[in-house]
Each structure stands twice: as C-alpha cells, then as structure tokens.
Image (cartoon, rainbow, N blue to C red):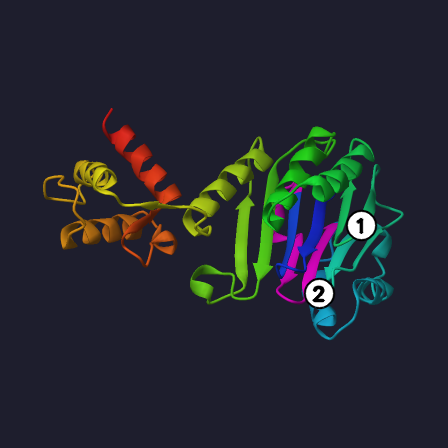
Amino acid sequence: MLATFSIVACDVKAGEWGVAVQSKFLAVGAVVPWAEANVGAIATQAYANTSFGPRGLAMLKLGFSAEETLKKLLETDEGREHRQVGIVDAQGRAAAFTGKKCYPWAGYIVGENFAVQGNILVSRKTVEAMAQAFEGTRGPLWKKLLEALRTGQRAGGDRRGQQSAALVVVKERGGYGEFTDRMIDLRVDDHAEPIEELARLLDLHELYFGLTERRVKLSAATLRRVQTMLKALGYYKGEPHGRLDGATRQALIDFHNTENLEMRLQKDSQFVDARVLRFLEEKYELQDR
C-alpha cells in the first residue's frame, strides 16, 4: 500500500459517503476504503493500519468528529509516522494525516466535504488536481469521485505506475433491493489501466441499478419494433402487431429479469425505460449481424 492516492468524500444532502482509490498494489480495494451510511468514510494507506477502518467508523458512530477520530487513532499507534489517513464524517467535516516517514511525494488537501491524499506520487499536482476535479464536477458522488481519480492520474498519479482501483459509495437503503447500505462497491484488482476499467464497470452499474431518468411511451410503432427485437432475441413468440398484449408484457418482463435490468422495469407497462430500450436495440443489432 506504499504508493496510493485516494479521496474520501460525501454528499450530505444526498446522504452519500464514499471512497475512491488507485494504487500500484494488488487489490487496493481490500485494504484502503471503509464507509458506513450516515457515519462517514475512511481511507487508510501507506503502511496501512487496517484497524483504522473499523475502529474509526466506530468512533464516528459514537459522535466523534473526523478530526477527533483521527487524533484518537494516531495517538495509540506507534507506527503513525508511516501512516496516511483521510476521514470525512457524517456532517461532511474532513481531516487527513501524512506521517513523516511516508515516501515522497506524500501529502494531502482537505476541503469542504472531502479530503484527498497520496504517497509516492510524481508531485503535489496529483492531489491538487483531484481536489479541483472533485469541486468542479457536477453530478452524483460516484461521478465526482471517479473524475477525481481520473484527473489525479492525468496529473501524474502514483510514480510507480498503475495496478488496481476501487470505488465505494454507501447510502441508507441504497443497496440492491434496499436491503443494505452498500450502494456501489466496485474493485479492479489487477489491470494495466485500472481507473478506466473502473469507469467501465461504473457505466455497467449505472445501467443495471441506476434510476430511470427518461421513459419512452410504448406507441404502436414503438411496440412493433420492440416486438420485432424481442422475437429475434427469443423472448416473444408472436408476430409484431403493435398492441400491448399479455405476451408482450411477459416478454418485456422476461427480458428485464434475464438481463439483470429488473430495477428499471416500469410499473406502468405503457412505458419502457429509455436506457433499457437502447440496451435492447444494441442487443438486437449485435444479434442481427
């Protein structure tokens, strides 16, 4: 974990906390990121003391601020000068630490609702670029975290190169089916370009689990095309006729469930999620070649 850059951050209004990290280290996501909904997020790196994750979250849950939690973690750790830590709490207060014995370049920037930190970097420009990217990017927290990683890499990143990356976002009832708080938990354990591979996985995650932003009315013309595509893919057995009958409804349900798109299935069967329709068109075009 010697060469790593990361960001801990939150969107208090949206009720989301997260960590994004990249390192020249195998499976960095198994070590650095820790987060709990309505509690905070922690990145522990350099010669990482992994107990800082669960212990720190426990302190935050008791009501300690990010700064207080950081102080308590460090004062009991004899190896503190080899550690690097970033913390953001439930209120968006952030704190960070870089030990004097971390390999250069090593340091951090703390801002409103975030902290960026890194060690064995090409230069300070990496964390500066990450901070600017986070503050300047619009959209959900995961998008801001990803852009911070991408920008940090372009600014120099880890001077030993790339190997793994991870991104975690937690939100109360934000997990699959609203059963857990794990909204996003993606890892790239070993890859030549881990941040770009992480971006690809995030795009898939958004396809499968993202909220519907636009719906398409199933007009007669649209239904005929949908029936044609579903028939070609083996979901619909009848002839395209442009009517929303029971067989068409079931074919649409089967397509959503088989392709893991059930979170985007519309309760009002007169509509289809626009991204699902695009995905269906892409599948049909590939099958038709």
Residue position marked by numbered label 1 in the rendering: 111
Q: Is residue 24 visible?
A: no
Image location (x, y in percent) of residue 94: 79, 57
Query: Is 152 rendered above or below residue 66?
Result: above
Q: Quadrant of residue 204?
A: top left
Left or right, residue 225 beside residue 91: left
Check residue 76 for magenta coloring.
Answer: no
Q: Amino acid at mark 2?
A: Ala
In the image, 145 versus 160, the foreground residue is 145
Residue for point 64% across, 47% down? 20
Left or right, residue 140 beside residue 112: left
At mark 2, the secondary structure is: loop
Image location (x, y in percent) of residue 84: 79, 51
Q: Outermost residue, top direction?
A: 289
Q: Amino acid at mark 1?
A: Gly
Image location (x, y in percent) of residue 179: 46, 67
Quick one: quadrant of the C terminus? Answer: top left
Residue position marked by numbered label 2 in the rendering: 90
Query: Is 96 rendered above or below residue 63?
Result: above
CA separation, marks 2 and 1?
15 Å
Q: Is residue 34 visible?
A: yes
Query: Is 137 rendered above or below residue 67?
Result: above
Image location (x, y in percent) of residue 59: 74, 71
> What span is in magenta?
22-45
Quick one: quadrant of the N terminus? Answer: top right
Q: Quadrant of residue 55?
A: bottom right
Q: Residues within 10 Å of mark 1 (few under 14, many from 20)?
A: some
**Which comes before the other along the chain, label 2 or label 1?**
2
At mark 1, the secondary structure is: strand
